[in-house]
Image: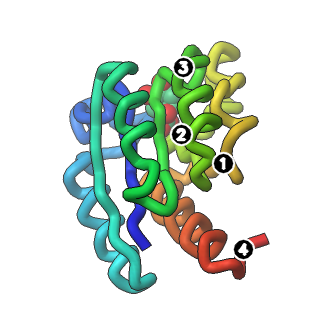
Amino acid sequence: LSILVLHGPNLNMLGKREPGVYGSTTLAEINNLLAEVALKLQAQVFPLQSNHEGVLVDAIHEALGKYQGILINAGAYTHTSVALRDAIAAVNLPTVEVHLSNIYRREEFRHHSYIAPVVIGQISGFGVQSYLLGLQALVEHLRGSGG
Ligand code: DQA
């Protein structure tokens, strides 16, 4: 199984960025941990980070026929982007949404996700574990043993 891993805006700053909220793990370290978990699950992850909405939309379109699923932390676009939501709906690839922080215990503007209605499920609040749990859930879903 090949999984596209999308990281949205500002996630390239992980490690330096608000460590009290997002932890001290860098994006490169997260990608390495995802690759390790993928190996155990006999899957492969292909990470892409972008600060540009259109680049993320293009990547979702191009995932069709190339990847079996998408793991996404859309960052702030979670709360603003109808375009990302429509792209996920358009390709109709099984997608899992993850967030390092618990978006529901933060500012009210983070409580709404435009993406949530078009994904299988969402994992929010477990730091780096959100990504690893999300990957595991996505792979199990794709193999047919997920709920
Ligand atoms: C985030 C939560 C978003 O509200 C925020 O804009 C981010 C990161 C998270 O992983 O906790 O950039 O998606």
| The quarter of the displayed image where residue 110 is located | top right
Q: Quadrant of the C terminus?
A: bottom right
Question: What's the residue type where badge 4 is placed?
Answer: Gly
Q: Position of residue 19 (x, y in %)?
A: 34, 36
* Amino acid carrying mark 3 in the image: Ala
| Label 4 element class | loop
Instruction: Give the camera-side residue of 129 and 47.
Output: 47
Of marks 3 and 1, the one in the foreground: 3
In this orientation, does residue 124 appear? no
Determine which residue is flagged by label 2: 101
Mark in front: 4 vs 3: 3
Instruction: List the residue tagged with mark 4.
Output: 146
Nearest to N terminus: mark 1 or mark 4:
1
From the top left corner, tell me how far across and down residue 37 is, in percent: 39, 75
Q: Nearer the viewer, mark 2 or mark 1?
A: 1
First-in-chain label (3 vs 1): 3
